[in-house]
Image: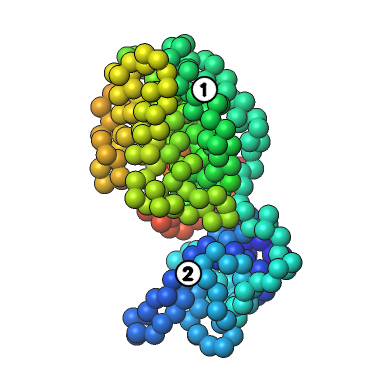
Amino acid sequence: MKYIEDFKEDDHIIGHYFCKQKQNLKSRAGKTYLSLKLQDRTGMIDAKVWDLNNDIQNFDENDFIKIDGVVLTYQNEPQLKLSKIRRSREGEYDPAEYIPRTDKDVAAMYQQVEELIRSVEDPQIRLLLEEIMIKDEHVRDAFQSSSAGKIMHHSYMGGLIEHTLAVTQICDFLGRRYKFVNRDILIAAALLHDIGKVFELSPFPDNDYTDDGELLGHIVMGAEFISRAAAKIEGFPHQLESLLKHCILAHHGEYEFGSPKLPKTMEALILHFADNADAKLAAVEKAIDSDASQNDWLGFNKMLQRNLRKTQF
């Protein structure tokens, strides 16, 4: 098969891909067309079907499909124009080829997470982290296999632990750089800031929002999960629980970005800045890594709302 990361303009693509999203839309002229997102283990690409005819057979979201199409460039991004589609048949594809995954060693990352937990000096905070991230087998396993997002950033298997570890390491650096920071609270909040995503998103290959994910979201679910875990620890201080939950509830930084609260402590502010930095820098990293051209400029990036330039070495 030809992987999405290797697609180039004018390539004729015939192969099997995972249909991540399917929408029936109308053009400005009122003509119905299909807008799809196709996925393999190397990435995702937008695809369009402008001519709905007998060569476009019935299929649904989350189906594996065989396509026939051509790679175009639209707004500086590759896009497929499809002329034929059918459902893939059993045995025509290997599901593992359609699950994007981190290129980092998940076991090694989890060891680093355990080291960070052991570095927490407050015994009750350390017990809380152990209760959630080590003793709870479902959370422990899902934390290592889940993505950190559906599309925006770290949207691949192992993305959640990769993002969480990076955010915690940034927090650890910043926490040592500034005064009036409680490192134990900061490290715990960083490790737990996206823990609700193990419930918000379904496992691969779907990687889609669960009912609770749509209704509540990972921020609320993460705060609730901390409350339940703290209740298992005798004498866990109410104020400490509130300070940790505040960091979770405030880590998106602004109301407009889905944050129920604005950051009001040093720990919450540092966590927000670290989370935002890793999400955006990872998006730039991905844009540079997926660009096969020899151009310095990558074109307009939708997430960052700007044209990006590569630095040549």
Q: How many marks?
A: 2
Residue 231 sits above or below residue 20 on the image: above
Q: CA distance from mark 2 to mark 1?
A: 41 Å
Q: Quick check: can you spot residue 118?
A: yes
The residue nearer to you, when weighing 188 against 176, is 188
Of label 2 and label 1, which has the lower sequence position?
Answer: 2
**Which residue extends farthest right?**
91
Give the secondary structure at mark 2: strand
- Which quarter shows the C terminus? top right
**Disc 2 marks which amino acid?**
Lys
Q: Quick check: can you spot residue 304?
A: no
Viewer-side label of 2, 1: 1
Q: Where does the image place residue 113, in percent across and percent down from the top left?
A: 56, 26
Residue 49 sits above or below residue 45 on the image: below
The residue nearer to you, when weighing 186 against 4, is 186
- Label at residue 22: 2
- Which quarter shows the N terminus? bottom right
Where does label 1 land, which residue? 130
Which residue is painted at 46% across and 72% down in the image?
A: 35
The residue nearer to you, when weighing 33 against 308, is 33
Q: Where does the image place residue 270, in percent across and percent down from the top left?
A: 36, 27
Q: Quadrant of residue 33?
A: bottom left
Which residue is painted at 65% across and 30% down in the image?
A: 108
Residue 77 sits above or below residue 81 on the image: above
Q: Where does the image place residue 160, in percent across and percent down from the top left?
A: 52, 40
